[in-house]
Image (spheres, grey):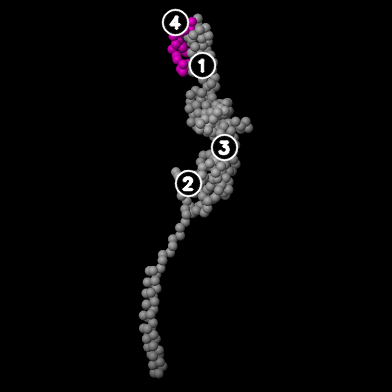
Amino acid sequence: MRVVKIIFKILFWCFIIFLLVLPIGLIAQISRQEMKNYEPPTAPVFREMAYGSIAQAYRTDVYEYFILSGTFLSHTYDYMEIDVPDPSLIRWDVNVGDEVQEGQVLGTYKGDPVVSTLSGILEERNSYGTDAYLKISLLEPLEMECSVSDSVLNLLKREDLELKTDNGEIVKLLWFSRIKNTDGTTNVKVSVDSDVYYYGQIVKELKVMTGNCYMQALVLDEDCIYQKTSGEEEPWYVRKVTSDGSFISEQQVGVGYQADGLVCVSGISEGEFFDAGYKAIVSGE
């Protein structure tokens, strides 16, 4: 019986202590909850991202070429003698600038036909005096007249290169002007070993291969390469990013041959990723 009283007394005082401690615990818990309401929010983590699509540097064979744009004309002339007693009496059916064909009737002299012995463009008609003639620009051989930049002119002038179109037609420089145009280009005449072109034909893009190939060159999308200020001697930069577009660093690169939207570069590693949108921001596009 004595043991029961002791146990009862212990339980009684435990209950009293519990009643005293419980409010303090509740108050402490409530205080902690209230303090959380006043805690500052966790600062967000900001990451600088790419401004456009992401391009990867890789290696490939790059074949060097350039583009010519111009008109096919002929600068070869011939003369047709007018063998009649009085050429001033000829009634002409053609005028300067007309195309004539061999065997075509050009006019009549006292009822007799005057027949062309040449084919081409009538450039001059002299039908007076004893030395009467027709000057005719022949339709072949054809020459392509165009204006080119200094870099293209240098390639055309190189004798160690065998220039061919992408169809295998041989291209040769025939003449170039010693005077530059106001836009910095130079007028040239080239021959193209082909019979598919015709007099007066305008060709906007004639692709000429130089025969040079940059084997397994490291290339990058041209939209990844930018300059902070324009100028041939100004440095070029790229914006290196992770595969998901997070910015890593800006770095300077060396730039080489450029064609078909690709640029041969140095100073970066194969497989690295770069921002293809920052160039538009720098250039204000």
Question: Sequence order check: which comes first, mark 4 or mark 2?
Answer: 4
User: Which residue carries the number 4 mark?
Assistant: 111
Res 171 quadrant in image: top right
| In the foreground, 147 or 30 | 147
Gap in angstroms between the C-alphas marked 2 and 3? 28 Å
Gap in angstroms between the C-alphas marked 4 and 3? 62 Å
Gap in angstroms between the C-alphas marked 1 and 4? 24 Å
Q: Position of residue 157 (x, y in %)?
A: 60, 31
Assign a secondary structure to mark 1. strand
Question: Sequence order check: which comes first, mark 3 or mark 1?
Answer: 3
Please say if 193 is above or below 92.
Answer: below
Extent of the magenta region: 86-112
Give the number of the mark in front: 2 or 3: 2
Disc 2 crowd rating (10 Å Cα; few below 14, some 14-19, many 20+) is: few
At a point 51% along the width and 11% down the height, the residue shown is 133
Residue type at mark 2 is Val
At a point 48% along the width and 24% down the height, the residue shown is 200
Gap in angstroms between the C-alphas marked 3 and 1? 40 Å
Residue type at mark 3 is Glu
Please say if 266 is above or below 72.
Answer: below
Q: Position of residue 203 (x, y in %)?
A: 49, 29
User: Which residue carries the number 2 mark?
Assistant: 282
Assign a secondary structure to mark 2. helix
Residue type at mark 1 is Ile
